[in-house]
Amino acid sequence: MLVFFDTEFTELGIDPKLISIGLISEDGERTFYAELSDTYRPADVGDFARLAVLPQLEGGDALMTMSDLALRLGNWLESFEQPVQLATDSLAWDWPWIQEIFSGELKWPENLAGRPLLLTMSCLNDYDRFIDAVEEAFRDLRRHHSLDDAKANRLGWIAAGGGVDHVASTVAKQTDNEPSQT
């Protein structure tokens, strides 16, 4: 199962802090969304995130601590009862949060691949169509809301010719220099 994910964080600087994470399954049937309550303070938030990210936070049931996130997200991923690979459009900014989430007391989910699928022009049949579909999706979705960004990437992947059959061949093309779970 391919699961698209995105994160929002305080800044693009040297010490960013996780604000939220959103995930959606390839079939679009299952989603996960969380906002962190213990990872940052208002003073940590840069101007961009203050203007574009914070106003879209939902609070309520989405709000949780990092340890709660690790438990809930791990359980959610393992509930697929099949191998799961995460997909992101930003390996450098999104993937380290997955590694951090599962670096504490809770172990890496057994069914979660140690490497993400990077949504780039080298792994899509039509990268321009991917970009166009992502932009089109934001007519109805909130840009810089982690779950909506994940949904937009899913729609872009589908529009660009991605799909279940495409995942196996794409994974085989990935190089050995991509980060692993350790």
Image (spheres, rainbow, N blue to C red):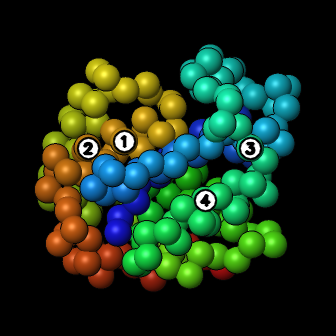
> Residue at the location (50% across, 30% down)?
144
The disc, 1 or 4, on the residue closer to the chain's N-terminal end is: 4
Q: CA distance from mark 2 to mark 3?
A: 28 Å
Which one is in front in this view, the residue at disc 2 or the one at disc 4?
4
Judging by the rendered image, the residue that carries numbered circle 3 is: 64
Circle 1 residue? 151
Pointer 1 or 3: first along the chain = 3
Going by the numbered disc 4, the residue's amino acid type is Leu
Q: Quickly name the residue at label 4.
A: 73
Residue 67 in view here: yes
Look at label 1 and name its amino acid: Lys
Up-down relation of residue 16 to residue 57 (above or below): below
Residue at 30% from the left image edge and 81% from the top image edge: 172
Residue neighbourhood size for the residue with mark 2, other residues' Cα within 10 Å, grouped as few (<14), some (14–19), many (≥20): many
Tell me the distance, in whole angstroms, between the alpha carbons under discs 3 and 4.
11 Å
SS for callout 2: helix
Specify whether 147 is left or right of 98.
Answer: left
Cβ–Cβ under 8 Å for marks 1 and 2:
yes
For the point 64% across and 38% down, which residue is it? Answer: 62
Looking at the image, tell me whether mark 2 or mark 3 is earlier in sequence order: 3
Return the x and y of residue 158 as percentages of the image width and height.
Answer: 20, 51
Q: Are marks 1 and 3 in contact (CB under 8 Å)?
A: no
Distance in Å between CA atoms under marks 1 and 4: 17 Å
Q: Secondary structure at mark 4?
A: helix
State which tag comes first along the sequence, 2 or 4: 4
Question: Looking at the image, is mark 1 or mark 4 nearer the viewer?
Answer: 4
Q: Position of residue 85 (x, y in %)?
A: 42, 70
The residue beneath circle 2 is: 155
